[in-house]
Amino acid sequence: ITIIIIITIIIIITIIIIIRYHHVEYPQTFMTDVRRTLSDNGRLFLIDFYNDPSRASDHSPEWLTSHIRASKAEFRAEIENAGFSYLYDVVLEELSENYIMVFEPKKKKK
């Protein structure tokens, strides 16, 4: 009798969330699942809108403040509370209404 065991290991090293995070209704649950899925040495890139009317260019100031559920700082805190460490911002002058934050999974304590 021959037994063949196939083990599939999927290693996800990068997750990019592009202009969708502000729609997430249960951010803690969502980000905890993202953290569980991402490899320990992976990176999370979050691209979303500033909730700041002074940054409006393609959208109205009212849209930015009414449509985007929280500020960049609040989104960062939500993601950090789900097991990520903030690394840095990527700054692109062309993205006046948007920001890019980069995170990594928090290191597990030994």
Image: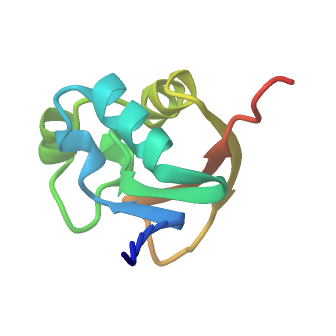
Q: Indicate whether 92 appears above or below 100.
A: below
Residue at screen point 44% across, 70% down: 95
Residue 50 percent location from the top left of the image: 38, 46
In the rendered image, the quadrant that contains the C terminus is: top right
84 vs 58, nearest the viewer: 84
Q: For the image shown, how many numbered marks are present on the structure?
A: 0
Residue at screen point 13% across, 46% down: 63
Q: Indicate whether 81 appears above or below 94.
A: above
Residue at screen point 70% across, 35% down: 106
Residue 94 percent location from the top left of the image: 47, 78
Q: Indicate whether 108 appears above or below 15.
A: above
11 vs 60, nearest the viewer: 11
Instruction: Name the quadrant containing residue 67.
Output: top left
Left or right, residue 21 beside residue 106? left
Instruction: Name the quadrant containing residue 1.
Output: bottom left
56 vs 43, nearest the viewer: 43
